Amino acid sequence: MTSTRTTSTGATGSRTPFTAAATAHDVLRGVDLTGRTAVITGGYSGLGLEATRALARAGARVIVPARRPETAREALRDLPGTEVAALDLADADSIRAFADALLAAGRGVDLLVNNAGIMACPETRVGPGWEAHFAVNHLGHYALVNRLAPALTPGRARVVSVASSGHFLSGIRWDDPHFRRDPYDRWLAYAQSKTANALFALHLDALAGDRGPRAFAVHPGSILTPLQRHVPREEQIAQGWMDADGRPADGFKTPAQGAATAVWVATSPLLEAHGGAYCQDCAVAGPATTDDMLVGGVKPWAVDPEAAARLWELSADLTGLDAFA
Ligand SMILES: NC(=O)c1ccc[n+]([C@@H]2O[C@H](COP(=O)([O-])OP(=O)(O)OC[C@H]3O[C@@H](n4cnc5c(N)ncnc54)[C@H](OP(=O)(O)O)[C@@H]3O)[C@@H](O)[C@H]2O)c1
C-alpha cells in the first residue's frame, strides 16, 4: 500500500504531514468541520466532487454552485450536508444572483474553493466577447469572490484557487488577453487562465491582509476527469496521458488524490503563515525546475506580485467589481 503520510517538508520548507498519494479523505481524517460552511464551484464532477465528499464527511455544510443544477443534485443525492444552487460563471447576472441570495440569507462562508473550470475548448466568446477560459476560469471566480466578500468569515475564511501546471505555457497576455489580435490557441487560452488563478490568490491574500481571507492557489496533479472532454482520445494517448485501453499514465492521480491539496490548503493550520502560496502535493510548491507538467512546481510569472496587482486591476476594470480596495 502506498503511504499517504510523511515526516518530510515540502519543497519550500513548509511542513506537510502528507505525500502526493494522500486523498482528500486522508487529509481530513480526524478534522472536524462541524459548523463550517464551504462553497465549491463545480463540486459535482471530477476533483470538485471528491472535495465536496471529503468536506461534507468532515462535517462541513457544502454549497455547490452548478451550471447544471439537476446533474449536480443527482451527483450529490446520497451525500448529506450538501446543497446545490444555480451558477454559471460565464454569466455576470448569474454570479450576482447566486451571491445576493447567499448574502440575503445572512450566511457566512468559511471555505470558498474556486474549482470549476474548462480546458482546451474550441474558441468560445462569452459576455461582452471575452475569451471563455479567461472569463469562466478567472473572471467568473474573480466576480464571485468580490460579490461574496461580505460573507467571508472575518479572520477565518480561506479562498482556494484551483490553478494548474498548465500555467507553464503562458503568462498573462497583457496586449491580447482575449485573442482578438492573435489567432486563438486553446492551450495558451487554458494556460493564461491558470496563471490568472495563481496570481488572483496571490493578490487577494495581499489585499486582504490581517482581516483575511487567506488565499492559496493549488495544482491538483494530473487526473483523468471530464475536464478532458474537448481533447480527442487519440490526442490524450499521443500526449501520454493514458494508454490505448484508457488507463491513466504513471504519475497520474485518482480524483480523490487530486482533491487532496485543495482541501488541505482550505483547512490546514500549517499554512497560516503562507498566505498567497501556490501549492501541490499537499505542500507549498517550489520554483519549477523543468517544463515537465507532471513534475510541476511554479513558473515565475505565476507568482509575480506586480503581475498579480496588474491582473487585479484589469479584472476590476472588466467586471466593475473591487470589494477589497
Ligand atoms: N483534471 C486535471 O488533471 C487537472 C489538472 C490541473 C488542474 N485542474 C483543474 O481542476 C479543476 C477541476 O477540474 P476537473 O478535472 O475536476 O474537471 P471537471 O470534472 O470537468 O469539473 C469541472 C467543473 O467545472 C464546471 N464548470 C465548467 N464551466 C462552468 C461554468 N461556466 N459555470 C459554472 N461551472 C462550470 C463543470 O460543470 P459541468 O459539469 O456542468 O460542465 C464541472 O462541474 C479545474 O479548474 C481544472 O482546471 C484539473
Image: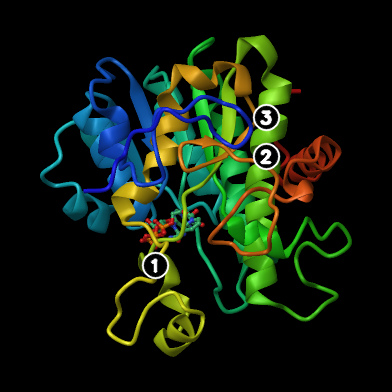
Does 24 appear above or below 291? above
Q: Nearer the viewer, residue 294 or 87?
A: 294
Q: Residue at x 48, y 47 (%)?
A: 94
Image x and y of residue 189, in percent: 67, 67
Image x and y of residue 171, in percent: 77, 57
Q: Nearer the viewer, residue 35 or 199?
A: 199
**Residues under numbered marks 3 and 1 in contact, where contact means CB atoms less than 8 Å apart:** no
- Per the rendering, the mark at residue 200 is 2
Judged from the image, the quadrant occupied by ligand 1 is bottom left
Q: Residues within 10 Å of mark 2 (few under 14, many from 20)?
A: many
Does 100 appear above or below 315? above
In the image, taking residue 24 as reference, residue 76 lies left or right, namely left
Q: What residue sits right under mark 3 in the picture? A: 204
**Residues under numbered marks 2 and 3 in contact, where contact means CB atoms less than 8 Å apart:** yes
Residue 306 quadrant: top right
Task: Name the kind of residue labelled 1 in the image.
Answer: Asp
Q: What residue sits right under mark 1 in the picture? A: 250
